[in-house]
Image (cartoon, helix red, strand yellow):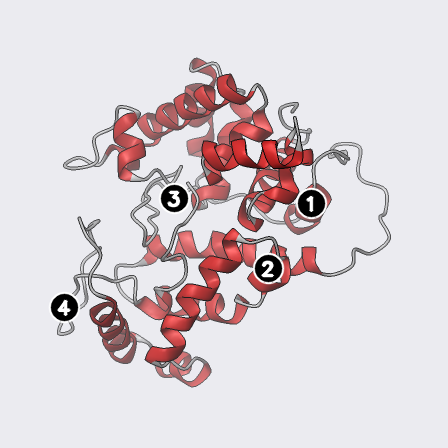
Amino acid sequence: MRACRLLLVLMAAAALVGSGADAPPPPPQPAATAPPPDQLYDLGKALFDQYAPPEIKAQYEFPSRVQWDDFATKLQRALEGDSFGDVAAYEPQARAALAALRTIPGYEDYADWMQERLDLIQAAGDAARPPPPPGPAPEAMPVRPAMPYYRLWLQRLRNRPAPADAGSLMPELRAAFAAEGVPPDLAWMAEVESSLNPRARSPAGARGLFQLMPQTAEAAGLSTFLPDERTDPEKSAQAAARILRGLHERFGDWPLALAAYNAGAGRVDRALAARHARTFAEAAPALPVETRLYVPKVYATIAVRTGGEGPPP
């Protein structure tokens, strides 16, 4: 599901809540409540100082407390706004976050989550620039004129290899979607959500292939504590498919269902009303930047991975 207030605030290992500073921290568990902002900052800085290698420290400077607080507020505002340029401006911080997370023991699962967010931020930069004159699209991946930013994502993803575990995971995920009455190709949304890492987690508490928040997962019938079934590929796929099926029943349209999975059904309802819209393409200008990029990325991922268009809208 879409990231919330702490999207990239936890840059440079500040996502590592509840860790000790004297030994490599174990993978964190979702906390019932977030720590105070000052504590979060101090933990992040201590871990960065202790575990980031010299080359990372030479390239990236940990932000001051004022910069930290400013970053948190402005990034969230950008993600919920309508300016691609505002989101793209956070690429340096996102790169710093990813570099740090890949070097600190026990936080590889956060890194996979961060990688997908960096991809979105870079795509926002592409969307903010005037597009080049369009060339002919390959027949196997035809352009969907009604899908904003679909061509942008095709260009970004066309030569990108599938995640290493795609061959073993996707048959199971596709079968789970089909069993729930959802187009099986939509199971490729797991690559967009988590880079196909069943253990991927966000600082906000989302986890698993489909980045389900605890309350959402529990409402879909999953356990989130001993065991956390969000990390079970089949069970999490079944839950995500049930959620999508319900959203499709509400909106009658798969792109709108994906938009609601990302931004929330209420946000999509308001966008449709504000634009007097019936489709995702018509409602997109009233949706957050993140959602406007998320939906076409799912369809472009399907096209690249399957050689087709993906499910019809």
The residue under the point 46% across, 30% down is: 170
Q: Work out whether residue 35 or residue 149 is closer to the camera in this orientation and state it.
A: 35
Q: CA distance from mark 3 to mark 1?
A: 25 Å
Q: CA distance from mark 3 to mark 4?
A: 26 Å
Q: CA distance from mark 1 to mark 4?
A: 43 Å
Which residue position holds label 4? 20
Q: Amino acid type of disc 1?
A: Tyr
Q: CA distance from mark 2 to mark 4?
A: 33 Å
Q: Work out whether residue 230 or residue 67 is closer to the camera in this orientation and state it.
A: 67
Residue 286 placement: quadrant: top right
| Residue 211 screen position, x and y as percent | 38, 41
Which residue position holds label 2? 122
- In this view of the protein, can residue 167 be seen by the observer? no
Tag 4: Cα neighbours inside 10 Å, few (<14), some, or many (≥20)? few
Disc 3 or 2, which lies upstream in sequence?
A: 2
Q: Is residue 16 above or below residue 246?
A: below
Residue 41 placement: quadrant: bottom left
The residue under the point 40% across, 28% down is: 240
Mark in front: 3 vs 2:
2
Query: Residue 197, which numbered label?
Result: 3
Residue 9 placement: quadrant: bottom left
| Residue 227 screen position, x and y as percent | 17, 35
